Amino acid sequence: MRVLELSMRPIQILCLLVLFPFVTPEAAVGAEASYLTFLVPGSLGTFPMSMNSSMTVTGYYTTSPSTASAFIRDATGTITTFSIRGGLWTEPESINDSGDITGFYEVVAGVQESFVRYANGRIVTFNPSVKSCFDYPPESLPVAINNFGEIAGNYSGFCVASTGFTRSRAGGFDNNVIKNYAGSNYPVGILGLNTNGAVVGYGANGSVYIDAGGLLVHPDGYVVGIEVPVSGPISDEATIPEAINDDGVVAGWYSYDCHNSTCTAATGGFVRSPQGDYTVFNPRGKLVAPVLATFFDGKTLYSAPKSLSLNASGVIAGTYTDATGTRHGFVRNPYGTITPFDPPRGMQTTATCINDSGVIAGTFYYDWNTQTSIGFLRIPAQ
């Protein structure tokens, strides 16, 4: 299973608008935004995945239905591409303010391994050193890199279930970040990391994702359970934190729509304050739950693109589907105001990330071409 299951085909670069690199969080909603759209030259589809405070965007682009390479687009519009040597698929997941990037690559289709590309262009590939079972190859999926170069992600091959890891800039691993939350046979996953080294993710209390509980793990190992305090069918509950900022604000989604051991849709989004207070919200439709990535040994976990992203000011960006099944982006300010959006003449919008200036990146299709995914930046008005 691909980490991002969107089907794309070719088109051309379109608009170029004025870029405002610094905007206030409040400007991210309310006033009308401008849009910049782009396509990696020669690609069949362009997929921004992460953006830093300098407006540098990273992601991947497809060159065939089964191959992809990575791109870096700086604030001037200059695009640099790269691939892991021998890789069929190279997909960045996160970029920090120094320009360091982490993500995964596949040399064998369906077998994910990790990489970090430093701002100077040096690439290091890695997997956590764990015991592999049944002769399965080691696999890992990074999800975030912070400004200290620490990486968080997930891996398989531990003989029992998927679990989380962190990697220091020097290359040291902690393979037991949230592994033992609910018992060794139940899966866990990390989805977010902040500059302080705190991670958020989930641990299943039962079969796969049914009754999955959220987790906040502090750098000292102290674990806080995260569970949206709303009533629903006990056997069908899940709380999935996806992002944490440096103030300790956590955002994610919860679901009562879990069937056949998998939560495939989100009931709503939530924000948890550093003091433990919860606020739930919904845009004008249903939040889009992240896809499930599958490891070689059949273990699955939620992966990119996430449903929600969060910046330093508490502004949230995400994606929802309306009653017709059409995707739209939305932005929610810290006061609870939600603004839906699509690029001009755009449809099937997916918002994948927001930076600390409130600029949102993602993908969409033009209404006159539903075959090619175009990258966009949504720039809030000053």
Image (cartoon, rainbow, N blue to C red):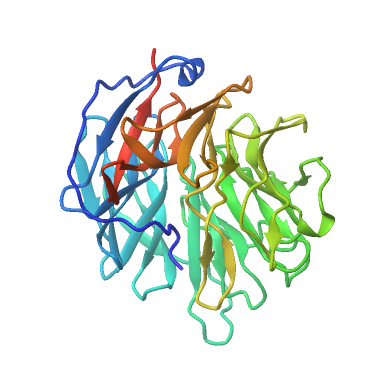
Q: Is residue 134 above or below residue 252?
A: below
Horizontal placement of 216 versus 287: left or right? Answer: right
Horizontal placement of 219 versus 362: left or right? Answer: right
The count of marks equals 0
Q: Nearer the viewer, residue 325 or 98?
A: 325
x, y percent for residue 7: 35, 58
Q: Quadrant of residue 202?
A: bottom right
Residue located 54% across and 52% down the image: 290
**Residue 56 visible:** no
Q: Quadrant of the C terminus?
A: top left
Q: Is residue 83 above or below residue 296?
A: above
x, y percent for residue 1: 46, 68
Q: Quadrant of residue 31?
A: top left
x, y percent for residue 187: 67, 65
**Residue 104 visible:** yes
Residue located 77% across and 33% down the image: 276
x, y percent for residue 45: 27, 52
Residue located 74% across and 70% down the image: 184
Horizontal placement of 129 versus 371: left or right? Answer: right
Q: Residue furthest bottom?
A: 134
Horizontal placement of 343 versus 143: left or right? Answer: left
Q: Nearer the viewer, residue 154 or 329?
A: 329
Q: Nearer the viewer, residue 221 or 360?
A: 360
